[in-house]
Amino acid sequence: MPLPKTPPQPLELLAPAGSVESFFAAIEAGADAVYCGLKDFSARAKAKNFTIDEMERLAAYAHQEGKQLYVALNTLIKETELPKLIDTLTALAAIPVDALIIQDLGLWRLARTFFPELPLHASTQLTIHNAAGVKMLERMGFSRAVLARELSLTEISAIRGQTSMELEHFVHGALCYSISGHCLFSSYTSGNSGNRGRCGQPCRRRYSAQGKTGFYFSTSDLSAIALAPKLATAGVMSFKIEGRMKNAEYVSTVVTAYRKVLDAHPKAKQQAITEAETILSEAFGRATTQGLLKGGVPADITTPSTKGGIGRLLGSVEKVFGSAIVLTTADTIHIGDRLRIQPSESDLSGVAFTIQAMTLSQRQVKRAETGSRVRIATPFKDIPLHAGDQVYKVATGKTFTMSGEACARRLASTPSTTSPVQIEASCQRNQLTLKAKSADCTLEESYEAAMEEAAHSPLSRATLERTFSRTGHASLTLTKLTARHLPPVAIKPSRLNEIRRDLYTKLAALIENHHRQTWQGRKATALAALLPPESPHPTTTDGLVVIISGVRDLELLSDREIHQLILPLTPEMVKAVGKIQFTSPDWQQRIIWDIPAIIFEDEWQGVKTAIKQLNKGGFIGFRINNLSHFHFFEAACDVKLTAGPWLYCLNSQTALSLAELGAQRYTTSIEDDRDNIQELITKALPIPAMIPAYGPIALVTSRIPLRGIRSTGGLESDSGDAIRIDCTSGLTVAYADHDFSLLGKLHELKALGSSSFVIDLSSSGALSHKGQKVLASAKTDHPIEGTTLFNYERGLV
């Protein structure tokens, strides 16, 4: 039911900052808020990012400018990282920052329980793509949802009609081909997980299909500047710019453009959009698209024939002289412009540099016009450059001119958060008594002071305020001074200054000690709540759980070595199961219905009806794969929920959070490694683990079709790795050519107490020759050739 209309929320322009230069560029260009990351737990681990000390100064500077600072802790957390995470949460709560952007449900539990003063924003990595997901966030205490980038304006509007929560949406910057939170591509190719902030961007690489090569997964950049008014009407209140890996000039340019549109009078919006689009043409991004916002899939969202690098093509290297290159430039260039040289024979990332020197007709110049044949010095003495390499201009160095050193000095000169001080002063019998209050600290001191009668200019409140306004400590600011019982006397200024220095030194020490004890105590409480390991309980039970897709595979219910079957919750399967008569009395308890992870708003009611009918018919087992799925079971009774792999559980706090939300089992992640799985499953948890032991690896799941590729076709990388494409679900799913398998390793996990292993035969069929071979190997724990351990042994980075 739609909510009654609420007053519109003020619009926020949210800018990225991966460096101190980008932070100041965003603030000066007019951003209302800035989001940035720390050196750890950031989804942009390759950005410069910030230390805790720097973050404290960033927050102080933002607040004195009337801006907000959000910290992105939007990665998955390993079990052994939980103590460090608590250190980080303690420090951020003490600053304090204005919100955390998070993905990991264990982080959510720790923040909610021990640091409730920190507002929480649900990262787009949580795949919030329907109203039920937003409602679940409300129930969990989040203050904002960062919506999935795959939504249309109509879908966003439908969500807004059912919630008053703050809604944030990306409006500009790089797009991922995959639905956020559903990409294992980088993790599979290198162990560097996008879910851990280390995406290697294999989607930007070249692939071949049916004799043609192209950049099939490489998306254009999002630019929704023309749709900004419609986004606001649809209910988006925070307009988010992607780009923590981008330079300060890019941030300044994009923020300036969106500021112009958001501030324009309604009658002047179209003119502002036109002017903003001109500004954005200087941002040196990729080709742009409005994404899926207008509904449907626009042709410009991917261009397989074009490499997805950013920048404006200047031309190709004509000659190489040592570390200098010669080219005929297709655009005007200046000293200070930033260029990227892209190897002509490779789709790997190029090298970038800032122009320090260039010559034209053997003359040193600061500027070269379009069409000039110019020689440019590069710093790449040890990197081979070749004729034919392409040269791109990626920044001009004109929009934001403050150097990195100047930005660092400005940040260093910004005091950290200041404490307001109030002083009560009284004076009698050669004694000045001062009572200072700041936050939760009170200091009262009495000072001997020689006093002389003064007929003119006696000691007054104004005199004391003038003296004590100079605190001598950047962390202290006098906000109020009151005085009582001041006789007509004078105290020497030198003595007043001595008293001032002593009072503030003692007060600063008192506040620091109180602050340290308070936060150390809270940190200790949180650390004490982490679960200890328990002694392993070896098991001999072969609890195999098999995922099937075909009706014939239901014959496996007669195999008592198979504990349960997981069935896809599709209309076809629901209908087929309803027609079959089973003789086993417990057959319904041995079936788990797998709810699709992605359910858009127009599909929700159909799935809800199916679940209700199944539950009414005696089925109690369901596997949920998105936070929104908990909403299906708010009024249900006697159900057993299994948290599926897309609810990523890499630590015990996440397992506890899933249990608190209503799950009876959790699933370890297919991309996890042996060490972390062992750390996790040996914790004293209230719910058991299901461990994926065999199955296909879904590298990406997307709402974007692959242009020119058959719905059940395939691709091949330059290195010969094959990728299988399946579009039968209505989404594009790219699978690795090799299935994941821990068969041959199950004894290791059984020794630690695990007894439930998931065998996914949905692609091959359980009764096929391959399916029967896999089942036989699972029962005997024998390895299967032609499979991959994924990150199990090499490690998840």
Image (spheres, helix red, strand yellow):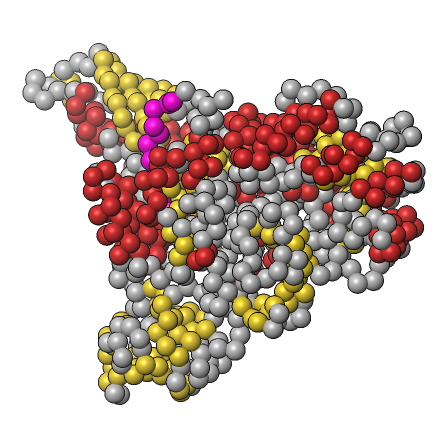
**Stretch of the chain drawn in magenta:** 5-17
- The answer to whether residue 71 is above or below residue 704 is above
Asked whether, in this view, residue 291 is left or right of residue 541, the answer is left
Question: In the image, what residue occupies the spot 16% across and 20% down?
Answer: 460
Question: In the image, what residue occupies the spot 46% across and 83% down?
Answer: 386
- The answer to whether residue 26 is above or below residue 382 is above
Front in this rendered view, residue 412 or 636: 636
Q: Is 545 in the magenta?
A: no
Give residue 289's position: percent from left, percent from top.
41, 54
Farthest-out residue, left: 456
Residue 337 seen in this snapshot: yes
Give residue 361's position: percent from left, percent from top.
25, 87
Quarter in which the C terminus is drawn: bottom right
Residue 505 seen in this snapshot: no
Question: In the image, what residue occupies the spot 50% across and 65% down?
Answer: 304
Question: In the image, what residue occupies the spot 44% across and 78% down?
Answer: 389
Q: Quadrant of residue 393?
A: bottom left
Give residue 741's position: percent from left, percent from top.
79, 54
Give residue 64's position: percent from left, percent from top.
30, 37
